[in-house]
Every structure is written in C-alpha cells, then in structure tokens.
Image (cartoon, coloured by chain):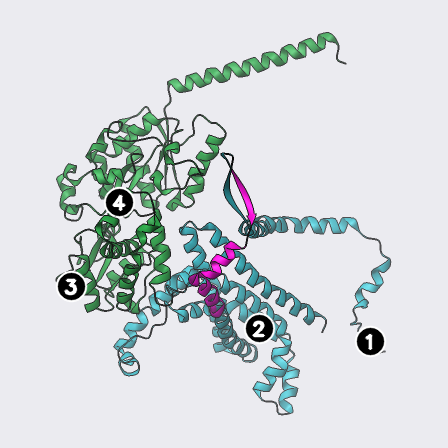
Amino acid sequence: MAASINLTREGPVAGRRHRSFNVREHLIAYLMVAPPVLFLGVIIVYPALRAIWDTLAVQHVVVHNGVQSVERTFTFDTYTAIWNDSYSRNSILYSLRVTITSVIVLFLFCYPLAIYLRFRHGYLTSIFRTLALIPLFIPTIITAYAFIAFYQQGNFLDVLMQKTGIEGTFFGGEYPQLIDNTTGIVMGQVWKNIPITVLLIGAGLGEIDNALIESARDVGAGWLRIFAFILFPLTLRQALIAFALAFVGVLGSFNIPYLIGPNAPPMVGVLMDQDVNQAEQLTAQGLAVITFGIALVVGVFYVAALARQRWR
Amino acid sequence: MYSRSNLIIRNVGALALTLTMLLSAGYSHTVRAATNTNLYITTLGDTNVEALFRDTYIADFAKAYPQYTVTYTNILHGTNAQELVVDNLTAAMATHQKSVPYDIFEDTPLNYTYPVGKTYKDYFQPLNAKNVPNAGKVDPAVLAAAAGYGIPYRGSSVVLAYNSLKVKNPPTTFDELISWIKANPGKFTYCDPNDGGSGALFVAGAIRSVMDPATYDKLDSTPYSKANEADWSKAWDLLKSIDGDMFQHGFHPNGNLPVLNLLARGTITVATVWSDQSLAALKTGLLPKYIKLVEINPPLPGSDTYLSVPKLAQNPAAARAFINFVLSPAEQAKMVVALSGFPAIQVKYMPPSIVKTIGSIDTGYDTHFVPGGLYYKDLEHLWSRNVPSGS
C-alpha cells in the first residue's frame, strides 16, 4: 500500500469547502488577537501615520483680517530641506552604509558559527553555544559602555598592548582606533545581533537531515559546495528573517551609534535626537518617515521572499 | 404619566438642586481663598536636584513657614517640559481658568516657545528685588538674564580642569588654551555641544574670541537675529584647525560625564567642565584630588537655574516667600554643600566656609551666551555641520 502525501495547494483546503463558517470560533480568535493589534495600532501605526501627515501637510500660522489661525499646506519642503542639508543627507547615506556593512559582517560571522554549532559536538561546542547567547541578556547600553571600557584609547586593550609591546612593534606606538568610529558601530551591532542570527540560522540548519550532507560528501563535495548548494538554500527562509531583523534593527538603532559611534556623520537615530534637542521636531519626524520608508522596502522584500519560499 | 403636580415637583426639585450646587460652589471658593495654604512646586532636574528640594528646601521651608502645605513634583531632566508645563498653561488660559496648580516652575520663561502673538510676559509674573527682597543680593547681570521674570537660585559656570601632576602651568586665557592644545595633541577634548554644556560653552568661548565685542554683547541684549552670527564661520575654522589635536584625533565624547572620566583616568590632562559637576566629582572621589579647577580670563559662559511663577499661579504670595527663603545665605550654603553649585547670591554674602571652597572660581561668568537659548541651538546646529571631521 503506497502512502501518498498530498502536497498540492488544494489539498488541506479542498475538503473544507462545504463546511459552514464557524463564527464563534473565528470571533474568539479575533478577540484574542485584538489587544496586541490595537496596542500596536495606537503606539506604532498611529504615530507613524501622523508623522507622515504632519510632515507632508505642514501646519503654520496664517493671519486673515487680523485673526490668527493654523492652516495646513501640502508641501514637500520638509523632505527637500533634509535632502539639501548635506549633514542630514550624509547621515542617511551613512546609516545605510553602516547597516549594510554590519549585516554583511554579521552573516560572515554567524553562518560559520551556526554551522560549527550544528555539526560539531562536545564540551567546547557547548561553551561556544552558551557564549553565542550571552549578548541576548546584556542591555545595549551596558554593551556600549563595556566596549568603551575595553576598546577606547587609554583603556584595557590599549594598556595591554602597550605592556606586551604589541603596540610598539605592530602599530608604531600608536593605539589603533577601534571605537568612536564606524568600526565601533559595526562591532557593537554585530555583537548585539549574534544570538538571534545564530538561533535562527541554527534552527534552519537543525531541519537539515545529516543524510543529505553525508550523501553529498560521498560524491566528493567540499564544504564550500555543501554550503552553497545545500546549507544556504535550505536555510534561506531563516536567513531572510535574520537579515530583516538585523537590517531594521541596525538602521534605527540609537544607543550604540550614540555611545561608540563617530561625531560625524551621525546615524539617523542620533540625528533625530539632535534635531529634537534643537527644537526641530518636524525635521526629526521627516527623518523618521524616511527611515520607515527604507525599512518598509526591506520589509516588503522580506515578505515577498518568504512568500515565495513557502510554495517550494 | 406627567400629571401637573408631578411636573411641578420635578421642576421645583431641579431648581432647588441647581441653586444648592451654585451657592455651595461659591461658598467653598470663598473659603479656599481666605486660607490658601497650598504651594505647588515643579522642578526639572536630575535626582540630585529632587533630593535637594525634597529633603532640604521643602523640609526647612515647612519649619520656617508651617502654615503652607507643599506639593512637589520633579520632571526628571526636564524632559518635555515645553509640553508638560507651557502647553498646559496655554490650555488653561484657553479654557479661561482663573488659577492653575503650578506656583513655582524651575526654569526661566525665556527658554520656551509660546503661541504666536504671546510672550513669556503673558504666562509668568514679574519677580524682582521689590517682591523678593533677597534678589537684591544677586549679581544684576545674572538677574537680568531672566528679564525680570525669574529669580536664580543656583548656578554653575564652565571652568578649566587640569591634572596638576602633569600640567604645571595651566593656560589662563582662551588664546593660551588654544596654543596649549596645539602644543599638546591628544591631551584635551571637549564634549559634543549637542550633549553637554561644558563642550558647548567652550565653543561659545571660541565664538567670542572671533566676534567683535560690540556684536558679542548684542547676543543677550538685543532680540535674536541671525545677522549677529556672521562671524561664526571664523570660529568653525578655528575649531577645525585644532580638531586633529583633540583626544583620539578629534573625538568629542557625548556628554559632560565622559569628559570627567577621561580626565580622571589621565587619558587627557586638561578639559572644560561644569563647576558644580566637577566640584561634586572631587567630593565623591570620581575625580582624584590632584585635578584642580581654574577660571580662565575672561571666564567662559555659565548659567543659573531660575525659579519662575506662572501668571495663573494659585498662590503667588507663598511662591515668592519660598523663593525668598531659598535665596537666604543659610539655604544657599546648604545647596552649595548638597549640589556643589554656585550660590545665586553673590559670594560675598555667603558664610566663610563656603567662600573658602569656591571663592576662587565663583568670580562671575560670561552672561552673554545663554545656555538653552536660541543662539545656543544655532551653535549646536552649526557646530555639528562644520567642525567634526566627517561632517
């Protein structure tokens, strides 16, 4: 007797065509989902829509026959002002650059780590597994201050390098600047995102049968081939999720660029803080809308890629 | 259902109820006005200011003036004070309220924006040496900075801190400081002006050094005008020329405290710092004892924190009594000990123990550049775009 597995789209749904629509079940489901959706709507969706509206329909005071009133005019001024200010423009482009760099470094670091954790076993591996999860439990601000304590000039690493003579022989007596520049931001962001990325990719790798790898090895495939043709395609879904999370997280981050980033150009989160402090609320809102836009593009790409994945 | 007698009873009942409510409202209002013992104070400070008010000022005030009941609130760091206080006052005025439960507000009215057509004079009451006698002990220039609508109660100015073990002859003027920076690369830094006043007011010193004195004086004596900023580009050139000689080739830490940390570690040997923050740090040991403070000549700007009274305050007499009390030498001495700030009253009125600790650096500060004002915001805005490498 051959068992047949129905993998077609119609399979699970076809049988239900003639069942009545069970209102009560659906109502309970929607009621349970309602509180978080409403919360999201009020806390995130409404302010975001409001920001778009306020920056495009700008309020200003007009005087008609000696009577003052507030009117809104439709204008792109908020955004042209941001684009014309080279500091703000550079900040947006810099944020994109740093985000892409961070995500690339993150994946270059996490994929090998996840593969190592999946295929090796033993005491050392379990230590690495624990270490990979530690950043999840450390708040970002503590991370940033730890980076300062370790990597800023005059601190731990600098003194260590001086005392062991490394600084003299390899760097000509000067401490190579590791934080308070782009390197600092990338290091901090990679550190922060390691746990989620490793967990996600690890989950994907866990679903891969060892037999697949073994049979590939049997026909003589090297590790690079195995990665490119087996591991990567089969973990694509998890990698996409990790990519989207990391990208949006780094793009909108504040603590790490503020504490261990360069003075200029600032990342977009830091620039928004500067604008609010300088009482330029509208510019900050405009920057926020631009950030939403970029994140939205990534989000759409991510959802589309995931959707395409499902039907494989 | 609605028989005539029923209707009459209902109407008489309604009328009686309405009259009772009207008359009782008027009655309680009169009673309240006769013995108003409430005082509402709002501060915008850090936890140390909150402790000062709660444990020292209000506790002592309750002993000296037991008839008052004080309700105290602190808006931590003054976050959103514009909305929380000023916009609430706007709303109260729009709904024609006669009084609001805000008697004392810990900021100068000049730091806020008001609806078009209104100024701080519509929102706050005038305060001067006539209705607050102890205000006569305050330096007139400092008092004038609030345009007669605020009384200072503590101050701080930006001074030079230096490591006395490594720096034997600290610079005494701004030009000497610039030369020192060029001669000692990597040993000085100032914080990002967006994040700390100690850095912003160093930049103000640079601006002062390139402006002609007459225009510089205009910064606080005439209404704000961008024309007065014409020479500021020279200041950016000056600061850019020394930026490479800063700590880490031009890195500006993001706040007043990181600069103190760098100084304490010995990584830098000279820095501009807030007097109250560094005196407090010296006291707690955050800064080692060999870090000394000195004022350069002419001194860098500083600021006082002011107390103001809204126009609609429900108990202005009590508010003025409190402000006067806070300005008494005894309470000012307690503030100096608790916060290490400069007293608002001139140091000559202070007890000798206080004069000994701060007399040498509490000699007044440059009042032309007002922290938090409109030129200050322009300074922050323009510095970021013109000075740091990468901008």
The residue at the point 71 percent across, 74 percent down is: A312
Q: Amino acid at mark 3?
A: Val
Q: Compare residues B232 and A112 and report the one nearer the observer.
A: B232
Q: Amino acid at mark 1?
A: Ala
Q: Colour of chain B?
A: green
Q: Position of residue A287 (x, y in %)?
A: 50, 57
Q: Amino acid at mark 2?
A: Gly
Residue tagged by mark 1?
A: A3
* Viewer-nearest of discs 1 and 4: 4
Residue tagged by mark 2?
A: A202
Farthest residue, direction front: A65
Tell me the SS state at disc 1: loop
Q: Compare residues A67 and B152 and report the one nearer the observer.
A: A67
Please tell me the numbered disc located at residue B339. Answer: 4
Name which quarter of the figure residue B383 lies in.
bottom left
**Which stretch appears magenta?**
A69-98
Tell me the SS state at disc 2: helix
Name which quarter of the figure residue B83 lies in.
top left
